[in-house]
Image (cartoon, rainbow, N blue to C red):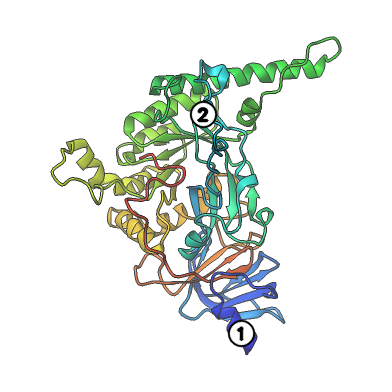
Amino acid sequence: MTRLLIWFLAPALALPGVPSLIAIRGAHVVPVSGPEMAQATVVVRDGVIEAVGPSVAIPQGAWVIDGKGLTVYPGFVDALDDAGIPAPAAAVGPRPGAGAAPAPPPARGPEDRPSTESWLRAADLVRPHGPHVHELRGAGFTTAVSFPAQGIFAGQGAVIDLGGERAGDMVVETPAGEYITTGTRGFGSYPGSLMGVIAYIRQLYLDAGYYKTVRAAYDQHQAGVPRPAYDRAIEGVLESPRILLPAGRLVEMDRMIRFGKELGQKTVLYGMAEGYRAGDLLKRANVPVLVNLNWPEAPRDGDPNAYVTLRTLEVRQNASSTAAVLAKAGVQFAFYSGGLTTRTALVRAMRRALDAGLGRADAVRAMTLAPAEIYGVADRLGTIEKGKIANLTVTDGDWFEEKTKVKFVLVDGKKYEPEPEMPPPAGNGRGRGPGVAK
């Protein structure tokens, strides 16, 4: 009895000695890969789904969880975040009396690689108790696609599970792609404009093509040939299986679709605040997109008398219809939290998308199978099927209803219960992590 109480009451921690063979019996199961099952059993063994179905036999010795009144979803995936990655350490100041540290020289051109850390790997940075891991897990997320967030070329993302005792336990797939931004804030010199940033990105890919050619030629004829210099910025660029480009406005979507083709890179667009205007464009381009659930809205503490353009009002009114438009057009899309971490905030955002016409099945897919497909891990994540990683979200009803509670999640077959929700941060939450562009 003591062990049973520990199993159900432990707050948000996977306990040592938790059984490796678990059966959730008689639950409402939403497999995504097929029709929903009103009463089914899910069997998990050693962190992998062993069986699912209405007539599955429970193996001897399994830890049985009564699923009556529970709904089981595939573990939810946050398709763009910085979960688990600690904030960069503050620069160490000079010793007392040593005078001010010299400022780095301004970038003179692309050869100085301004604002580029393409070689950073989220897989090397994530920590099991890093930022937002517990909050997202409490909201029902078992997985995040986490990226470094600083700079034009911010670094390599990784698909991570939001559990485990060591960083190595978290990584499902790396690299997941290169996170690229086009912001110009903070540049005192090159490439201090949007045109300069785009020109720099283009130049770095031209340099990467030349670098690859020279390296290949050297590898074939090394004797007597000068050795090409190693360039870690280009190595990071070449390692990326895909790039993520910002596209909040319609003009940016068209621009980034063309830009991705010019660069010859497999491209994913993120933002999509004006995606409701771009269904046909995105369908023709056949480019997957990531939709920010943190819908544009007026600042909470903003001046009520401040001038607001009609276009801004239109976007605030219609952005939440983006997902419905994309689903109707047949565009592949997934959701990301965009700075929202509590289940309350995420459900309210999702309710706006549902009220704007998005079907529940499409909403579940955009939080499970769609991100797994976009990042090439659908063979391991995204559905409740035999052989897949045992990431499950278990609720006491429909996740999209505000009164529903997340009872627990399984991450790699380990059970975690949610911690109490923390108050939301001041402001609208858009200052955190990657993908905040609208």
112 to 367, vertically: above or below: above
The numbered disc on residue 115 is: 2
> Nearest the camera: 357 or 308?
308
Q: Position of residue 399 (x, y in %)?
A: 41, 66
Q: Looking at the picture, which amino acid does disc 2 mark?
A: Ser
- Disc 2 versus disc 1: distance between alpha carbons? 52 Å
- Mark 2, Cα crowd under 10 Å, few <14 / some 14-19 / many 20+, is some
Q: Earlier in the sequence, mark 2 or mark 1?
A: 1
Q: Secondary structure under badge 1?
A: helix
Image quarter for residue 309? top left
Q: Looking at the picture, which amino acid does disc 1 mark?
A: Leu
Q: Residue at x 38, y 28 (%)?
A: 254
- Mark 1, Cα crowd under 10 Å, few <14 / some 14-19 / many 20+, is few
Q: Secondary structure under badge 2?
A: loop
Residue located beneath label 1 in the image? 4
Query: Quadrant location of the N terminus?
Result: bottom right
> Nearest the camera: 268 or 162?
162
Image quarter for residue 326? top left
